[in-house]
Amino acid sequence: MGPIEAIQPGNESRPVVSAVAWTNGREAIVATMAGDGEIFTCEINRGQSSELSYLALVVHALGNSDRVAILGSSTARLALEREYVAIFHRPDRIIDEEPTGAVDTSSLVARLRALAA
């Protein structure tokens, strides 16, 4: 399987209102919420991809969300935030977060629900 490993089919073009990602620079978990409250998750592994290609995949999974929280180590988080802004030109949508260690999908979904509340 390619670098995107658990993406839900058919969710690539739906409108996303909130999104949360965790990354360590080698892998990412992304959770997104559509306007109807439906939640989708995916895992992205960098594999042999360049950093820029990997970050672009993660940003694509986040979508052009109204609110975005990016979790992870300072370096990985900053790189992903910069790529999000480079693609969507919307730094105002990024919610400021503290550096965090690894999280699992259920923790990320809980953070997404809190962000969307």
Image: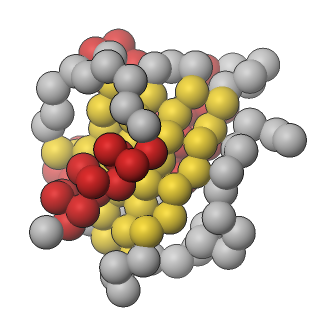
| Image quarter (top left, top right, bottom left or bottom right) of the C terminus | bottom left
| Residue 72 visible in the displayed image | yes
When asked about the image quadrant of residue 3, the answer is top right
Tell me the residue at 74%/22% (across/down): 47
Rendered position, 84 above or below 77: below
From the top left corner, tell me how far across and down residue 58 is, in percent: 53, 42
Residue drawn where x is 26% and y is 45% of the image? 69
Q: Residue furthest bottom?
A: 36
Residue lying at the far right in this picture: please name it: 1
Residue 64 seen in render: no
User: How many numbered dots are placed on residues in this image?
Assistant: 0
Please name whichever residue, 1 or 46, is drawn nearer the observer in this view of the structure: 1
Quadrant hosting residue 13: bottom right
Name which quarter of the figure residue 9 lies in.
bottom right
Front-most of residues 45 and 113: 113
The percent position of residue 65, horizontal first and vertical second, equals: 35, 62
Give left or right: position of 13 versus 19.
right
Q: Is residue 99 above or below residue 88?
A: above
Residue 99 position in % (x across, y down): 22, 21
**Residue beneath the point at 30% across and 32% down:** 71
The quarter in which the N terminus is drawn is top right
In the rendered view, does 40 fall on the left or right side of 116? right
Give the colour scheme shown.
Answer: secondary structure
Residue 62 vertical position relative to residue 23 in the rendered view, above or below: below
At x 62%, y 38%, the residue is 44
